[in-house]
Image: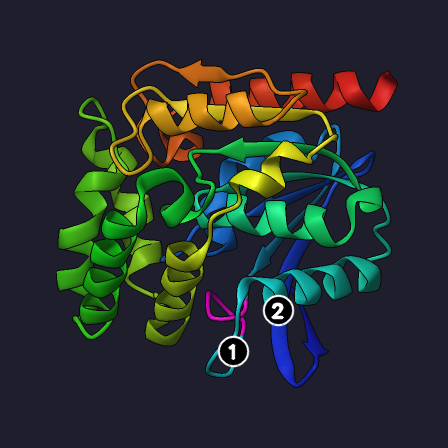
Amino acid sequence: MEVRRIDGLSIAYAQAGTGPALVLLHGFLFDSRAWARQIEALSRDFTVIAWDASGAGRSSDPPERFAIDDWAGCLARVLDLAGIGRAHLVGLSWGGLLAQELYRREPARVRSLVLADTYAGWKGSLGPETAEERLAACLRDSELRAGELVSKYLPGMHGASAGEDVRDEPAGIMCDFHPAGFRLMARSLADADTRAQLREVRAPTLPLWGEDDARSPLSVATQLQGLISDAKLEVIPGAGHLSNVEAPARFNDEVRRFCLDRATA
């Protein structure tokens, strides 16, 4: 892991492989370790960057009132320091919101978007009432001990067919969550409604979804597909919210095919 100082924050990221740049953006309660199988497989074809967002993993916590545009600015600086110009962005859950924000700020640097099990913000995809309910729960649960939080959140992250071996790895990552980062990421999701923004997306976009995602159901995937002019939905059978962990081979194949096709177009 590289660790860089950006605007007073310590930001950690991994870089591997050669080829077109591919940036992996994790969800809340997770960090770059959630992409282990993607880094290993996709670095054969891409220069892969997987960061720990501020408030996660080995990165330091952001200040109070840090918002999604602040994370996007920080991510842009990381890419600059890593020598990355244009890149494919792969964002899962909260990471998908961050990918949308980086595209809004700097569309010229985005080759394509893979929006995996994500949202047009909680407000935009689930409605204001559900957004507020989820935020209130996250703010409350950020005070839980790690084991209690894992027991509460992990079951909803997986499809019913996920075995114990698949569940153990995410549980270990979640145990290292940053309470401050969790609260701020949840707030950014609750406040966001990117539906109008998604109508302006002109980059090739792949909504990639677990069929059994309970946190962001397939109705959200079809919503995003309908909002984005150049989007084609792919569904991974049997996978839940952490589709990259439950079905890494299928997830990697879809990402590789989509991004390489755009690189050669």
Exactly how many numbered labels are in the figure? 2
Q: Position of residue 181 (x, y in %)?
A: 41, 70
Q: Quadrant of residue 213?
A: top left
- Asked if residue 259 lies in the magenta stretch, the reply is no
The vertical placement of 194 against 31, above or below, is: above
Residue that carries the numbered disc 2 in the rendered image: 70
Secondary structure of the residue carrying tag 2 is: helix
In magenta, the rendered stretch is: 54-59
- Amino acid of disc 2: Asp
* Residue 64 left/right relative to 80: left
Q: Is label 2 in contact with label 1 (beta carbons under 8 Å)?
A: yes
Q: Residues within 10 Å of mark 1 (few under 14, many from 20)?
A: many
Q: Position of residue 107 (x, y in %)?
A: 78, 44
Q: Nearer the viewer, residue 201 or 265?
A: 201
Quadrant location of the N terminus in the rendered image: bottom right
The vertical placement of 53 against 259, above or below, is: below
Q: Nearer the viewer, residue 115 or 230?
A: 230
Residue depicted at x 65% and y 55%: 14
Residue that carries the numbered disc 1 in the rendered image: 62
Secondary structure of the residue carrying tag 1 is: loop
Residue 39 visible to an observer of this rendering: no
